[in-house]
Image: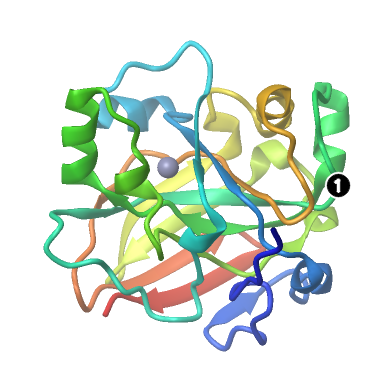
Amino acid sequence: MVVSSPVFNSTPIFNSTLMASKPLEEARQLPLGKIVCVGRNYAEHAAELNNPVPEQPLLFIKPATSAVTMQQPLQLPKGVGDVHYETEIALLIGQPLSKASVTEALASVVGVGLALDLTLRDLQAELKKLGHPWERAKAWDGACPLSNFIAAEQVKDWQALELSLSINGVEKQRGQASQMLMPIAELLSHISQTFTLLPGDVVITGTPAGVGKLAAGDRLQLELTGLLKVATQVI
Ligand code: ZN
């Protein structure tokens, strides 16, 4: 089923600065697909939530309906406990990828951007205790704000990609792809052994330490160092 995407069909973002390039025009043509997410891909983040580091990547999927554009203020669900931010590097897939080798994997990426893997942390804790899937805590409508994407050719060194998040002027998260337990190329190859990635799919690559609660009025500044800046606000 083709799902029209509010993210990719949007007009240029007024509150984000694309430092290295114009928005990736190709992204606007792609129907947004599934969002494949990686949990506990940075050791310090696993430790801050008292989770063991997994032996292989922990994967889950957010549906296309969880995506919203960061150019709109973030609307959080109410009465469901804490809503946590997790800032992540997002990869936009442009070529089908299935059972790919590590050397083939990066060629499928057409765009790079930022995502917030919004998580109902209290609910997730309950679900974990019950041994239930996490979707109710992570896959709700609006649970995956996405920035615009810049062309993947802008990335000279994938391991050097660095993200940061400040809230109300205070830095909360900073992480570099080199700190990931599984680097981006390996991660894509690994994911493609289980899930075929299709054009329009997005992979979000895990969050560094520093996750926390969002509150109404919070002003967020996200940056992919040297490439992309986004400002948004919680209403
Ligand atoms: Zn995450």
The structure residue drawn at horizontal position 71% and vertical position 63%, both measured from the top left corner, is 2
Provide residue 53's location: percent of width, then percent of height: 39, 17
* Up/down of 20 relative to 154, above or below: below
Instruction: Give the residue furthest to the front.
Output: 1
Q: In this view, does 127 lie to the left or right of 159?
A: left
The structure residue drawn at horizontal position 54% and vertical position 30%, both measured from the top left corner, is 180
Residue nearest the viewer, comparing 119 with 66: 66
Q: In which quarter of the image is the N terminus?
A: bottom right
Q: Quadrant of residue 98?
A: top right
Q: In which quarter of the image is residue 39?
A: top left
Q: Quadrant of residue 99?
A: top right
Instruction: Give the residue furthest to the top.
Output: 55
Q: Specify how the rendered protein is coloured.
A: rainbow
Q: Is residue 197 left or right of residue 133?
A: right
Q: Is residue 193 left or right of residue 137?
A: right
Q: Quadrant of ligand 1?
A: top left
* Up/down of 34 relative to 171, above or below: above
Q: Quadrant of the C terminus?
A: bottom left
The structure residue drawn at horizontal position 74% and vertical position 69%, both measured from the top left corner, is 20
Q: In this view, does 161 lie to the left or right of 63?
A: right
Q: Which amino acid does label 1 sit on?
A: Gln
- Mark 1, secondary structure of its residue: loop
Q: Label 1: which residue?
A: 95
Residue nearest the viewer, comparing 80 with 14: 80
Provide residue 183's location: percent of width, then percent of height: 64, 28
The structure residue drawn at horizontal position 74% and vertical position 74%, both measured from the top left corner, is 23
Label 1 neighbour load within 10 Å: few <14, some 14-19, many 20+: some
Residue nearest the viewer, comparing 140 with 166: 140
Provide residue 221's location: percent of width, then percent of height: 42, 69
Provide residue 86's location: percent of width, then percent of height: 38, 49
